[in-house]
Amino acid sequence: MNSTVKGIVRDTLLLFIITLIAGLALGFVYQITKEPIAKQQEKTKQEAYQAVFTNASSFEAVVMGDGAGMEVPAENGYTQQEINECMVARDSNGEELGYVMTVTTKEGYGGDIVFSLGIQKDGTVNGIQILSISETAGLGMKAKEDAFKGQFAGKKVEAFAYTKTGAASDNEIDAISGATITTNAMTNGVNAGICFFQYLEGGN
């Protein structure tokens, strides 16, 4: 075996060892961090549930069975929205107050937007709490501000629509200036949640 071949074999072996060590190190770090990350994500979700249903004492997962009903938003035109999770909100006596959903809307300018949505038993929207958003600073990120997201709270409508000329009725939401795409994504996300709520309550 000449020196050139030996050099290639040596370099290949060295690269393999480095890659193996790096892979093992990453795997080790992942095993260490995955549980704390999962716990933090669950804590964030629970805080979001409480934020959109302040008078609830507990939350119980709605078991759909084989994803039944999860396709309802898409069937009603909300093809870029998903209901990732749905919880029943209960008071201290165990009485059902309404639902909390985790909604993903894929129409954001900067990617997916994930938020919690609370809806009372009578269909009144309690509010929304954003879990994940990557919109443009100073524009789409204003979706996190109460001035925008607070517009949905306390309203009972079939569906929301946004306007650039000033909301004139309960079903209208003032668009975020310069961020129509984000506004549309959030509005459709909330509407998908309302659609799913109507399904749960036997309205569809």
Image (spheres, rainbow, N blue to C red):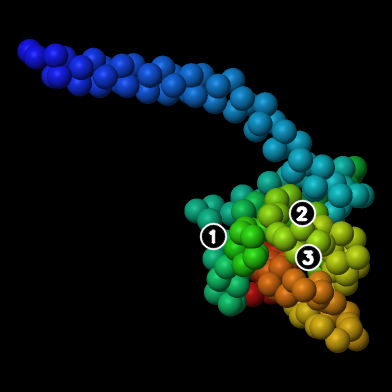
Characterize the local packing of mark 2: few (<14), some (14-19) or many (20 or more) Cα atoms within 10 angstroms.
Answer: some
Q: Amino acid at mark 3?
A: Leu
Q: Which mark is residue 130?
A: 2
Q: Are marks 2 and 3 in contact (CB under 8 Å)?
A: no
Which percent across, then down, holds residue 65?
Answer: 54, 52
For image coordinates 84% across by 54% down, the residue present is 52
Characterize the local packing of mark 3: few (<14), some (14-19) or many (20 or more) Cα atoms within 10 angstroms.
Answer: some
User: In what element is the residue under mark 1?
Assistant: loop
User: Where does the C terminus fall, quadrant-wise?
Assistant: bottom right
Which percent across, then down, holds residue 11?
Answer: 26, 19
Please determine whether, in this image, residue 181 is positioned above or below residue 62: below
Q: In front: 33, or 96?
A: 33
Mark 1 highlights which residue? Answer: 68
User: In what element is the residue under mark 2?
Assistant: strand
Q: CA distance from mark 2 to mark 3?
A: 15 Å
Q: Which mark is residue 139?
A: 3
Q: Horizontally, is 135 left or right of 167 in the view?
A: left
Q: CA distance from mark 1 to mark 2?
A: 25 Å
The tag earlier along the polypeptide, 1 or 2, is 1
